[in-house]
Image (cartoon, coloured by chain):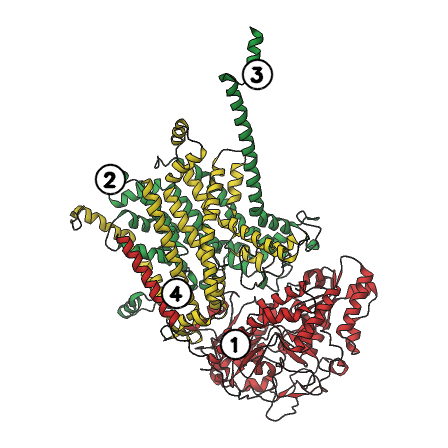
Chain colours: A red, B green, C yellow
Amino acid sequence: MKTMKKLICIVLCLLMVFSVAACGTEGTGSNNSSGEPANNSSVIVENSSETPSDTSTDVTSVDAPSETVTPSQTSQGNTTSAPVSNLWAPGTNDNSDGGTSAPKQTSLTWKQVKAKLPKDASGKEIELYNWNTQIPAQKAAIERFTKETGIKVKYKEEGYDTYLAKLASLVATGNPPTVVRLRDNDPSYMMSMQPINKTGYDFNDTYWDQDILMEYNVNGLLYGVNLESSPYYQPMVTFYNQELIDKYSLEDPYELWKSGKWTWKKMYEICEDFLKAAGDGYSGLSTLVGEYVFSTGSSYYSYKDNKYSANLKTTAFLKAMQNMNTQYQKGNICDIVGNYSDFSLGKILFCNESEIAGRQSHYMMTEIKKKGTLRAVPIPAVDGQKEYYVPILENEAYGVPNKAKNIELAPYFLRFYLDTANYNMNSFYAHKTILEAVEWTRSQKRVSVLNELDTNRTIIGIVEGLLTCTTSQIKTLIESKYYPSAKDAAAQATKEIGKLVK
Amino acid sequence: MTKFNKLKQFTLSGRESSLSVYKVRKKTVSLISSIARYVFLIAFSYTLLYPILFMISHAIRDPMFFNDPTVQWIPKAYTFSNFQSAWVVLQMPTSLFNTITVEVISSLISIIACGVAAYGLACFKFRGQGILNALLILLILVPFSMTLIPNFVNYYNFDFLGLFTLIEKIFKVEIDTNLLDTLWAVYLPSITAVGLKSGLCIYIYRQFYRALPKELFEAAWIDGAGPLLTYVRIVVPSSGVALLTVSLLSIIWHWNDYYIAQMFLTNHRTMAVELNDFFMHHGLDGVVVSADSCMAACLMFVTPMLVFYLILQKRFIASISATGIVG
Amino acid sequence: MKLFQKQSNLIRNRNRWGYVFCAHWILGLAMFFVVPTVTSIYYVFSNINVGQGMKTTWVGLENLHYIFNSDKNFVNNMAASLSYLVTSLPIILSLSMVLALILNSKFRGRVVFRAIFFLPVIITGSVVMMLMTNNAVNAPIFSAASGGGESTYTEGAINFQEILVNLDLPAQIRTLIAGYLAKVFNLIWSCGIQTILFLAGLQSITAQLYEVAKIEGANRWETFWFIEVPMLRNIIMLVLLYTMIDLVTERSTPLMTQVSNLMYKQMIYDRSSAMLWIYFLCAGAIMGLILFLYNRLCIKKWE
């Protein structure tokens, strides 16, 4: 009897809890993030010292156009595929005083920056928090920094899975690291950060990447920075196998790029020639999800005015997806999920991948790097489109967490650590064409690819949809299955961003 | 007369013939059942063995045949270079040493501590027993992730009941009570039986101790053994099953655990942590980081546990029949 | 025994030893368990600002309102997870009992099979499984199931769609079969330790009982129900509890993926704690019910 009484008690308690929870009023309304962002760098200047004929000013956000964009709406005068004058010429490095075409923008050299260091900086220690193993080039750069300024730097390597949890825990203990690497302008990454304006450093300087500053800007407060010439900048490029080009006497993509004729149509033509010549067991192109789509300027999400919106239903996006599907059904694209290993073994001609695969120290594509036949050109341009958009895999930035100590030293460290002038770029990549391609993309418009807001689910879902449905079914597929969840994720992310500025 | 006898053999009447028919029937039934048994077991084993076979097949094959669809199981070229790469990427001697010091030892401590606690719970009736039993169930249910951040802060400034600040004030000594990155972050929970899945271990022990017959304890009591002696001399030797089960499970869980090691012990990188970060390694000279070497690393990770289980298995079965408890 | 009969001093002193043996455990609970659990319950009723060092502000039942009314997936996910618990439990129990019975009998290769059937315990729940399912690097057979991202252990382990592509079936039937195969596969992988426990229990039944049964003329079915199950009643209880806990905290169920996504990826601790506690309350109620029924019906009968 006693146990029966206990059981009835428990059941009644549960019923009470549920009824109270279920019959209560609606939850409090979501935070409506308000106001225009007071951008402290509202005029964006492309790095003029690198691309003399390519200065373009753009007031709106650069990464992804919003719902009803047409390609002609965005900036003026950006050359797309005539890069002759945009050659990266060695020697025009950013150490010189960059000429500016807009007021209030300066570009300080390292010496000038170092002169601004606080007097008592020497001897202090700051901590850099990262999730990759340290490569020797990074170690050398850090040692040189310590020698020049006397500030000690500790490199802490943490696992990637526990990164966010560990950061939050460290902030909770009151002793977090000084500088933290951020992968994307996702609210969950920026949660434990404080605005970097609090370091008192003036980021109104063309040396810092203004696009990143724009993206990590929430309500006028800046949460993440990166240098314009940072080696940790991940555009997508098209890798190709020089050996196969020579063997089957195909058109050389590098020459095509230099003469301004490197477009998607051309690439598919080369793929068809290759498949005809090579036969079975080979494939033309391996692409990650939808670089073609990003080349047209669309992306899954856009972030503007503190708001995230899902772009899956825009006409531009749908058209681009359908186009890609047509190509896939034709059989030119072999793999939509990034088969770089087969590319590395010489079975695929082109591979659209992030530039990180071309780095000498990276594990991807080892075989072809050993052979020395790895080359790269930027992602092709879209035929008939004036603008050129380069897909950026990760919008990496560095920030300062809450309650960190010695934060005023952080920007100086970043200014040194993230400067390619302090890295031997010749040995950074496997071949100089890769370096050329990467440097050229710096001057182009960016489209952000990786956004952690439910991205994996969306991408994988759309890809799997592409594998099975026809071109005409894409619209219904995206609208019915992926757009609702993407919209939810965007709304959720907007809310979280709103919390940041409380 | 003989003809009649011979006829008898072929008729179904008579006890002899029915016995032989029965034997034949029994033999066929047992043959069918053993065939069925083998088929059933082999079908099951295929699904269970699939990952191991996959790992072995990929670990041995030459990288040239990575995605070759014609090669399903048996690669065309053998190489052991994947194992060499895995050895370097996993930073092997260090990580093996770290795994043993961190995980294996804390698991052994946990086994002993849980046994003691379960003995107290099961064999004595004291006042707070109900509450402790409820807390035990709660301990089993609540996942680690919920208590992660408060525990982290706790370790950072470990100050239980203000004891350490008191000591510091009295003796005017500076004690650094940051338990993170030291082995105490893992040993202390194990000693106090609240480590990784300790709740389940205590529960298994408790169930087993409850099933021991009361006569055993009463006999020991009459002979003048105190509770401690009873535990050491009687309960532990007869808890063969529970001890082996708990030690097997506990060591395997600790060996496979990477979350706690990654969160709390950044300086002691165990094998599980290195394996988890396998693809984050860049810039190691002469080393191929690919899916094949990853499979080789997985094999290296799983083998010690397999060997451990195989060794333990024989003693498992043997010791149970020797307990003399049931029946 | 009368209710308020005082125990003799001797017995009470003896029982006080219980405190001594449990002392270190009580200390450990107080240091490491009680406070975080209570804070986690506190999180259910408050808003947390993770970035500021977990600052909490009390908001009452807002989180509960949110997860029941505004969150579209919570109730469905919870229903899916609880139904997964209830349906998988008898299957796993019976499967592991059958396997243990088979492995108990004498046949050739017994040791090998016992080793094989223990493999899932070693492999699942570890880094190895995560590496095999979550990596886009791997061969197509081992690929993350659709909607991946977070690591799904055995459900995503073998992509049955890929294997079934060879048979020319329409896509829907293929998905259906693949779903069932994945579920079966998952179930087989979950009954590793239960088999071992049953096996251990079966080994402890003395041969005399079997002889008695044979003499009495019991066939196999009756032997099973009248000898083996009663002798194993404690172990069945243990296996019940272990299986239920395993199923409740398994990370690939819809609710747990949602919760871990919230907790680890988006760092929203208040709502995920609320979800988790509600889920545990319900699951705990179900578990208590099952154990209570088992106690009442089965153990009392065999006392």
Q: Residue A27 at x, y = what percent?
A: 42, 76
Q: Residue A349 at x, y = what percent?
A: 75, 64
Which of the two discs, 1 and 3, sits closer to the camera?
A: 3
Q: Is residue A150 visible?
A: yes
Q: Which residue is mark 1?
A: A491
Q: Residue A192 at x, y = what percent?
A: 47, 75
Q: What residue do we see at 24% from left, 52% from top?
A: B126
Which of the two discs, 1 and 4, sits closer to the camera?
A: 1
**Chain of the residue on which disc 3 is drawn:** B
- Labels 3, 4: one chain: yes
Q: Which residue is mark 3?
A: B10
Say left or right for A372 vs C81: right
Name the residue furthest right. A249
* Rendered view: B40 above or below B23: below
**On residue B151, which mark appears?**
4
Q: Residue B230 at x, y = what percent?
A: 28, 42
Say left or right for A132 vs B224: right
Q: Give, as a three-letter code, the residue at label 4.
A: Asn
The answer to whether marks 4 and 2 mark residues whose Cβ atoms lie closer than 8 Å is: no
